[in-house]
């Protein structure tokens, strides 16, 4: 029993220390399964040595499967983390888009107001010139009369 606990503990530590990619783990599992099917032929009696080999192969398959499951769960955790980051960035993007639209609306109001003021200024200059020219003509007429 102690040997089994030590084996599990050592395999767990080795799993953390020497993590492998999912593809390499799948390849390793396929090789182990092939070894298992080569030894365990249906209808054939197994020797004691072959039974020990089968047990060790099955233990290795369990360890590899545990690593694969661990890799998938790590991947799921990463996916969830990235999904949360994406959601927060989308919310921030919506917020910034709203602020940008508000700023664009304010600029539009400023541009329209500036345009109206420019038109009013031009009209006032034109009216001033008209009034000035009328004043000059009236002033000339008054000077001629006197």
Image (cartoon, grey):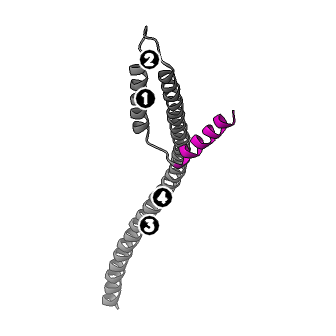
Distance (Cα) linking label 1 and label 3: 84 Å
Choose the circle earlier in sequence order: 4 or 3.
Answer: 4
Image quarter in which the C terminus is found: bottom left
Choose the circle earlier in sequence order: 2 or 4.
Answer: 2
Distance (Cα) linking label 2 and label 4: 83 Å
Closer to the camera, 22 or 41? 41
Q: Residues within 10 Å of mark 4 (few under 14, many from 20)?
A: few
Q: Secondary structure at mark 3?
A: helix
Q: Residue furthest bottom?
A: 146
Q: Residues within 10 Å of mark 1 (few under 14, many from 20)?
A: some
Q: Secondary structure at mark 4?
A: helix
What residue lies at 34% left-to-right and 74% top-to-bottom? Answer: 130
Name the mark nearer the viewer: 4 or 1: 1
Q: Is residue 32 above or below residue 14?
A: above
Magenta run includes residue 81:
no
Q: Residues within 10 Å of mark 2 (few under 14, many from 20)?
A: some
Name the mark nearer the viewer: 2 or 1: 2
Name the mark nearer the viewer: 4 or 3: 4
Q: Which mark is residue 40?
A: 2
Q: Which residue is mark 1?
A: 32
Q: Which residue is mark 4?
A: 109
What residue lies at 51% left-to-right and 36% top-to-bottom? Answer: 72
Q: Is residue 110 above or below residue 10?
A: below
Please state if 105 lies on the left or on the right of 133 as rendered: right
Magenta region: which residues? 1-17
Magenta run includes residue 12:
yes
Distance (Cα) linking label 4 and label 1: 73 Å
Q: Which residue is mark 3?
A: 117
């Amino acid at each position: 029993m102690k040997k089994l606990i030590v084996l599990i503990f050592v395999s767990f530590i080795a799993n953390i220390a020497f993590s492998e990619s999912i593809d390499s783990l799948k390849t390793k599992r396929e090789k182990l399964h092939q070894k298992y099917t080569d030894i365990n032929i249906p209808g054939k009696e197994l020797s004691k040595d072959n039974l020990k080999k089968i047990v060790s192969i099955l233990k290795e398959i369990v360890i590899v499967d545990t690593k694969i499951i661990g890799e998938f769960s790590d991947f799921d955790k990463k996916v969830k983390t990235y999904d949360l980051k994406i959601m927060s960035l989308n919310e921030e993007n919506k917020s910034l888009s709203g602020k940008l639209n508000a700023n664009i609306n304010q600029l539009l109001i400023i541009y329209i107001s500036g345009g109206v003021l420019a038109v009013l200024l031009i009209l006032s200059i034109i009216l001033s010139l008209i009034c000035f020219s009328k004043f000059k003509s009236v002033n000339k007429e008054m000077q001629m009369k006197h």
